[in-house]
């Protein structure tokens, strides 16, 4: 069993090709692979398979460390895209792949960087159970703090729901000091599992550093606090633009937002109709072959 490990801004995934796996990739097997002690470890598994739609290069399946499946991941998608190019699945600089969220269209910019057409973001979706609000609302985390968060301070958060492949809850805070002081492992689970998000949600806290530049911290469903998230950055950028933020540096029809994450920077272009293009890099960490013992352990799982 061969696989590669890739990372984008510190967000690391294992990349496998479905037709070269010794056993089907189940939730239990994904959990073992992502375990940093029992397996290679990672923020998820990217499974690539032959195209299922005409005119596309591949189908991408994204599995979280807890075994759940994600509709889309901006960082994971870029890693899969750059893998496809390096491994000769395509020699084109523009192509399409399919995900659970639908078709996405990358443009290769260099050996490590691509721009991905992420589609149109929405503020109203089935992932937000508060109709008629255009995605805006408030959450009281007094009763939803993580059980281990004995010292966490309950707060009432105003948020913006954004659906960009998967559900995002974007929360703007006043300043960088407040943002950096947040205990995401304590407050993230309660928001991720809050009843207003029937399918759980990713959460992005952000603040403006200067016009057109925001700092964001991300808590991903099925993952926890992460160094970066492409869809999380996109959700924060969309919420920022909807709240009137921006530099005015884009043209009349879009706003370019730089999102600074723990792992680095991403550029999110948000059009007037909320169409999103995400630009960033992804690089391989290593290529490897699983041991006979690991393959045997995978076979023993359902």
Image (cartoon, rainbow, N blue to C red):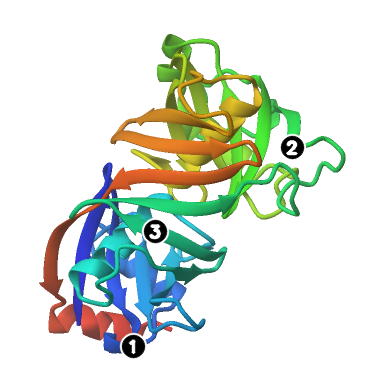
Where does the image place residue 169, in percent across and percent down from the top left?
61, 37
Q: Secondary structure at mark 3?
A: strand
Q: Which residue is mark 3?
A: 106
Residue 23: mark: 1
Q: Nearer the viewer's eye, disc 1 or disc 3?
A: 3
Q: Secondary structure at mark 2?
A: loop
Specify which label sits upstream in the sequence, 1 or 2: 1
Q: Secondary structure at mark 1?
A: loop
Tell me the quadrant of the picture where the N terminus can be found.
Answer: bottom left
Quarter of the image where one finds residue 16: bottom left
The residues tagged by marks 1 and 2 sit, at their Cα atoms, a distance apart of 41 Å
The residues tagged by marks 2 and 3 sit, at their Cα atoms, a distance apart of 28 Å
Up-down: is 228 above or below 46?
above
Where does the image place residue 72, in percent across and percent down from the top left?
50, 58
Crowd around label 3: few <14 · some 14–19 · many ≥20 (10 Å): many
Q: Residue at x 63, y 50 (%)?
A: 200
Up-down: is 145 above or below 230?
above
Cβ–Cβ under 8 Å for marks 2 and 3 = no
Specify which label sits upstream in the sequence, 1 or 3: 1
Q: Which residue is mark 2?
A: 135
Classify residue 78 as left or right of residue 52.
left
Question: Could you say which is closer to the camera, residue 120 or residue 142?
Answer: 120
Crowd around label 1: few <14 · some 14–19 · many ≥20 (10 Å): some
Crowd around label 2: few <14 · some 14–19 · many ≥20 (10 Å): many
Tell me the quadrant of the picture where the C terminus can be found.
Answer: bottom left
Question: Could you say which is closer to the camera, residue 123 or residue 142?
Answer: 123
Q: Nearer the viewer's eye, disc 2 or disc 3?
A: 3
Where does the image place residue 89, in percent across and percent down from the top left?
27, 77
């Amino acid at each position: 069993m061969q696989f590669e490990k890739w990372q984008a801004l510190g967000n690391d995934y294992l990349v496998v090709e479905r037709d070269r796996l010794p056993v089907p990739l189940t939730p239990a097997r994904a959990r073992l692979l992502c375990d940093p002690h029992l397996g290679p470890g990672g923020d998820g598994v990217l499974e690539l398979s032959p195209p299922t739609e005409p005119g596309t290069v591949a189908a991408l399946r994204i599995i979280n460390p807890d075994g759940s499946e994600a509709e889309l991941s901006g960082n994971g998608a870029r890693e899969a895209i750059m893998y496809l190019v390096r491994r000769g699945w395509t020699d084109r600089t523009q192509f399409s792949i399919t995900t659970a969220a639908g078709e996405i269209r990358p443009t290769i910019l260099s050996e490590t960087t691509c721009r991905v057409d992420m589609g149109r973001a929405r503020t109203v979706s089935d992932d937000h159970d508060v109709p008629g609000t255009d995605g805006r609302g408030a959450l009281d985390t007094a009763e939803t703090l993580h059980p281990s968060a004995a010292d966490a301070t309950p707060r009432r958060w105003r948020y913006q729901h954004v659906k960009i492949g998967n559900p995002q809850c974007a929360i703007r805070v006043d300043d960088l000091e407040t943002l950096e002081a947040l205990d995401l492992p304590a407050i993230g689970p309660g928001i991720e599992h809050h009843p207003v998000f029937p399918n759980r949600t990713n959460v992005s806290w952000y603040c403006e550093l200067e016009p057109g530049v925001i700092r964001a911290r991300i808590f991903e469903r099925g993952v926890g606090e992460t160094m970066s998230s492409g869809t999380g950055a996109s959700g924060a950028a969309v919420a920022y633009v909807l709240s009137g933020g921006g530099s005015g540096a884009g043209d009349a029809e879009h706003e370019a937002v730089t999102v600074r994450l723990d792992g680095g920077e991403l550029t999110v272009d948000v059009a007037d109709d909320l169409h999103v293009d995400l630009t960033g890099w992804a690089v391989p960490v290593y290529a490897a072959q699983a041991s006979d013992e690991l393959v045997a352990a995978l076979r023993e799982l359902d």
